[in-house]
Amino acid sequence: MEAVTKEVTTREVIDRAKSTIEKAERLLKDRGVEYDLGEWITIKKYCERFGIKSESMVTNWIRRGVIPPENIHIVEELNGLRLIKAVLYKEQQ
């Protein structure tokens, strides 16, 4: 049986991302928590913003305490999504 593939346009990806962000914002607001999603971002977005090649590097920073606990928020309702405060934690080498 052949796998069915669908070419996804850039517009579709952007629309899906916006929809996900809106859902996350509504869920957080319903819980009485408001995060500026420009200030609090996912690990993937953090890597993109600060030019870090590996998400595992940021995950290791979290584990080792380079990123302080007060700058990490875990959203259990979104499958444990981790948001981190969007500041540079370690100088790039």
Image: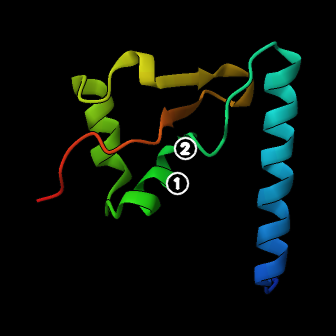
Q: Is residue 30 above or below residue 14?
A: above
Near-viewer residue (37 or 24) = 37
Q: Which residue is the extreme one toward the top?
A: 32
Label 2 secondary element = strand
Judged left or right of residue 21, residue 49 is left
Q: What colouring does the structure picture have? A: rainbow
Judged left or right of residue 38, residue 9 is right
Location of the N terminus (image quadrant): bottom right
Three-letter amino acid code at the position of disc 2: Thr
Q: Quadrant of residue 66 in the image?
A: top left
Q: Is residue 1 above or below residue 65?
A: below
Q: Quadrant of residue 37 in the image?
A: top right
Q: Quadrant of residue 79 in the image?
A: top right
Q: Circle 1: is it few (<14), some (14-19), or many (20+) Cα within 10 Å?
A: some
Q: Are marks 2 and 1 in contact (CB under 8 Å)?
A: yes
Label 1 secondary element = helix
Percent coordinates x, y for residue 22 in the rendering: 85, 44
Percent coordinates x, y for residue 35 in the rendering: 68, 29
Q: Which residue is mark 2?
A: 42
Three-letter amino acid code at the position of disc 1: Lys
Seen at 33% across and 47% down, the residue is 56
Residue 3 visible in this rendered orientation of the protein:
no
Near-viewer residue (43 or 5) = 43
Percent coordinates x, y for residue 84 in the rendering: 48, 34
Near-viewer residue (76 or 26) = 26
